Amino acid sequence: CAPPDAVVWPQAVGQVQELAALCHRCRVPMVPFGTGTGLEGGVNAVQGGVCFDLSRMDAITELSLEDFSVAVEPGVTRKALNGHLRGTGLWFPVGTVGTGE
């Protein structure tokens, strides 16, 4: 386990942009964290740095029933999305992103 040197909780895209620019200027590694559902070990800060905890960015910004698309911020969970979709006839099942299903 390699924790980051610091954790920030941006709540808007502009804040993420400003923090990322600062880290880039100072050559500090950035470690993104969405909702903690990944199994890839992406939050393991092997070179230290700043963890961008994006869990508070949890808005569902667009929904198009016609083309089955939805735009969400990185902190939106599958359960929250399905709650938003309830009553539309649509749902977001587990295991469909990037699996070829």
Image: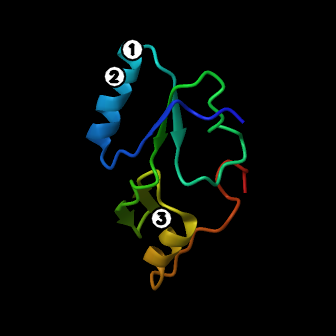
Q: Dot 3 surroundings within 10 Å: few (below 14), some, or many (20 or more)?
A: few
The CA distance from mark 3 to mark 2 is 37 Å
For the point 47% across and 64% down, the residue is 68
Question: Which residue position holds label 2?
Answer: 22
Label annotation for residue 26: 1
- Quadrant where the C terminus is found in the figure: bottom right
Residue 61, horizontal then vertical, whole percent: 33, 59
The CA distance from mark 3 to mark 1 is 41 Å
For the point 66% across and 35% down, the residue is 44
* Above or below, 74 relative to 6: below
Q: Is residue 98 left or right of residue 28?
A: right
| Amino acid type for the residue under numbered disc 3 | Phe
- Between disc 3 and disc 1, the foreground one is 1
- For label 2, the SS is helix
Residue 94, horizontal then vertical, whole percent: 68, 65
Q: Is residue 4 left or right of residue 1?
A: left
The first of marks 3 and 2 along the sequence is 2
For the point 46% across and 54% down, the residue is 55
Q: Dot 1 surroundings within 10 Å: few (below 14), some, or many (20 or more)?
A: few
* Above or below, 1 relative to 76: above
- For label 3, the SS is loop
| Amino acid type for the residue under numbered disc 1 | Cys
In contact (CB < 8 Å): disc 2 and disc 1? yes
Question: Which residue position holds label 3?
Answer: 68
| Amino acid type for the residue under numbered disc 2 | Leu
- For label 1, the SS is loop
